Image (cartoon, grey):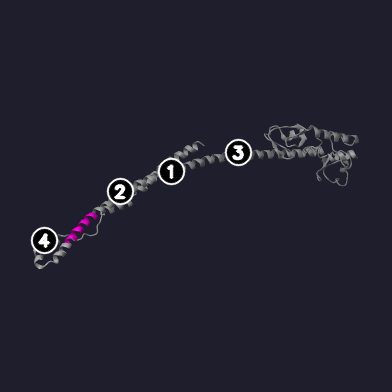
Amino acid sequence: MAARDVAGSFQEEVTCPVCLEYFTELVSIECGHSFCRACISQCWGESEPNFSCPQCRATTRQRNLRPNRQLGNLVELLKGLRVPAGLEPEGQRVCERHQEALKLFCQEDQSPICVICRESQAHRTHTVVPVEEAAQEYREQLLSHLQRLREQREELVGLKSAWAEESERLQRQTAVERQLVTWECQRLRRFLAERERLLLARLGELAREIGQREEENATRLGEEISQLSALITELEGTCQQPALELLQGVRSSVSRAEKATSPRPAPKCPELEQRIRDFAGEPRLQEAVTGFLESLAAERGLGRARGFAGN
């Protein structure tokens, strides 16, 4: 009874999670889980690029099977404990209740049973098949699912790679566009700065000419004002003289007064005003900018074509 209890304690530790039997040629993989060599080889297949643990799904790129001697010795120890009872064939588990080999599988309860359990009230109406047959059926189902899941994984890996390539291509195109935008704006700023310099220079020249005209007119009008002021002073003095003295030079004074020109109308510079209107209305700046943008668009298309060709 003591040996049977010890065997039951170690049952899970010495059972392959794939075939649910005692380990045969026990090996461990990188994640630490153990399997029968034949079971893990069948799960992995021959051409898989990556290998995953059937128990924890951890992946590895190398098929590295290491013999687990310590656990193998434990398996042999448990087998040795079973053998003296004469109730357990080598490599088989036995029913804890009847000490018979678990050769049958109950579909309803999803558990292995012995031939005595099969005839019991609990399993008499259930669908029961041999353990190997049930295991083979489920193994085939699992392998079918594994194949489908591997194909899905490969498809996802391909999609991930394709998206990475597409993202890289779009990033290169974005970089080309960024360079073109920077280049265009720099060119446009330089063009506008040069046009601004030229137009402001023309306006400055026009302003200097207006100032020169103003200075000339101010000088001439100042001289005329001085002459009139002198004549007014003289005539005022003559008017205050006695009659005889006034009459002596009055004709000359009257003559100079008659020759004095009447005040001119407010100064006008129609030609300068016309030049200002012409400058404001001329479409040269707009035409120049339009022409520059058309040229820039042609160069931009060439630059974009060269940038995308490099991609």
Q: Which residues are magenta?
A: 217-231
Residue beneath the point at 61% across and 40% down: 160
| Relative horizontal placement of residue 22, taking residue 180 as reference (left or right) | right
Residue 109 lies, in percent from the top left, at: 81, 45
Q: Bin the neighbour count of mark 2 within 10 Å (Cα to Cα): few under 14, some 14-19, many 20 and up.
A: few
Look at the numbered disc 1 and give the secondary structure of its residue.
helix
Classify residue 234 by image quadrant: bottom left
Residue 161 shows which numbered tag? 3
Whether residue 299 is visible here, answered yes or no, is: yes
Q: How far apart are the alpha carbons under marks 2 and 4?
A: 47 Å
Vertical order, 74 against 228 (above or below): above
Q: Nearer the viewer, mark 1 or mark 4?
A: 4
Report the amino acid beneath label 4: Ser
Vertical order, 209 against 14 (above or below): below
Residue 186 shows which numbered tag? 1
Q: How far apart are the alpha carbons under marks 2 and 1?
A: 29 Å
Residue 122 lies, in percent from the top left, at: 86, 47
Q: How far apart are the alpha carbons under marks 4 and 3?
A: 112 Å
Mark 4 or 3, nearer chain start: 3
Residue 267 lies, in percent from the top left, at: 24, 57
| Relative horizontal placement of residue 264, taking residue 38 as reference (left or right) | left
Q: Is residue 138 magenta?
A: no
Q: Main secondary structure of the magenta part?
A: helix
Q: Bin the neighbour count of mark 1 within 10 Å (Cα to Cα): few under 14, some 14-19, many 20 and up.
A: few
- Which residue is denoted by mark 4 in the rendering? 252
- Which residue is denoted by mark 2 in the rendering? 205
Mark 3 or 1, nearer chain start: 3
Q: Nearer the viewer, mark 4 or mark 3?
A: 4
> Mark 1 and 4 residues: CB-CB less than 8 Å, in contact?
no
> Mark 2 and 3 residues: CB-CB less than 8 Å, in contact?
no
Q: Nearer the viewer, residue 217 or 176?
A: 217
